[in-house]
Image (spheres, grey):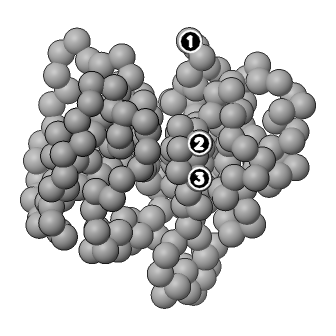
């Protein structure tokens, strides 16, 4: 599987406010860039925190890109993939609509009644090990690859990004840095989780000004 990760952060490295409230960090040109990256993927991955905070649809915004996918024999929208160890995704979440397939990766010990409710709502549930209450991200990606996902686009959040980097699973990493300051020691950052005892080095391969910010492209 080929993994492309992308995020938008404030100039001080925050994903949202300390209340986990989404704020406008990027603009129309970056939204289009992200839509293009989604269109190239087989599935778009986020953690359950993103679902609970923002209730995104994770579908394409541009109809032309949907048409292009259909013409290439692919679904109009990439599948949605959620890391949700405790199956907290609401059954009325937008990612469970019929606009695209949705894969939900949960702890193998998750309550059967809860997962059946999510399956009834439209999800395909994959059970994997979840040591320390967090889905084993390597096992999760293996399950998605078995389900036909060859190119995965990851949109966060910080816990998911940490897990992927910790397991050395990211092939491309792009970050939009907006001209915004959020602050707050409790605000989520680009890479949360336990953190690394020694820095994880990246190779900068491109810098591009987009909207009122820059996109940094890295080779992990």
In the rendered image, residue 38, in percent from the top left (x then y), is placed at 45, 65
In the rendered image, residue 31, in percent from the top left (x then y), is placed at 35, 69
Q: Are marks 2 and 3 in contact (CB under 8 Å)?
A: yes
Query: In the image, is residue 203 above or below residue 100?
Result: above
Of labels 1 and 3, the one closer to you? 3
Q: Secondary structure at mark 2?
A: helix
The image quadrant of residue 94 is: bottom right
Q: Which mark is residue 132?
A: 1
Of labels 1 and 2, the one closer to you? 2
Image quarter hosting the C terminus? top left
Which residue corresponds to mark 3?
55
The CA span between labels 1 and 3 is 26 Å
Which residue corresponds to mark 2?
52
Q: Residues within 10 Å of mark 1 (few under 14, many from 20)?
A: few
In the rendered image, residue 180, in percent from the top left (x then y), is placed at 19, 52
Would residue 219 appear left or right of 209 to someone viewing this image?
A: right
Query: In the image, is residue 106 above or below residue 119?
Result: above
């Amino acid at each position: 599987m080929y993994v492309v990760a992308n995020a938008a952060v404030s100039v001080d490295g925050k994903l949202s406010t300390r209340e986990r409230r989404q704020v406008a960090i990027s603009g129309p040109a970056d939204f289009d860039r992200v839509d293009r990256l989604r269109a190239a993927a087989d599935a778009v991955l986020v953690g359950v925190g993103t679902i609970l905070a923002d209730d995104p649809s994770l579908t394409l915004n541009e109809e032309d890109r949907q048409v292009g996918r259909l013409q290439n024999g692919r679904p109009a929208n990439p599948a949605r993939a959620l890391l949700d160890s405790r199956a907290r995704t609401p059954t009325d979440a937008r990612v469970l609509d019929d606009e695209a397939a949705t894969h939900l990766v949960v702890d193998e010990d998750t309550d059967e009644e809860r997962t059946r409710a999510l399956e009834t709502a439209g999800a395909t549930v994959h059970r994997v090990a979840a040591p320390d209450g967090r889905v084993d991200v390597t096992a999760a990606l293996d399950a998605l690859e078995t389900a036909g996902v060859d190119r995965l686009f990851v949109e966060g959040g910080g816990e998911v990004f940490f897990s992927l980097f910790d397991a050395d699973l990211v092939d491309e990493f792009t970050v939009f840095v907006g001209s915004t300051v959020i602050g707050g020691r409790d605000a989520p950052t680009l890479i949360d989780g336990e953190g690394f005892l020694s820095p994880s080095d990246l190779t900068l391969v491109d810098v591009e000004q987009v909207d009122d910010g820059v996109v940094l492209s890295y080779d992990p």
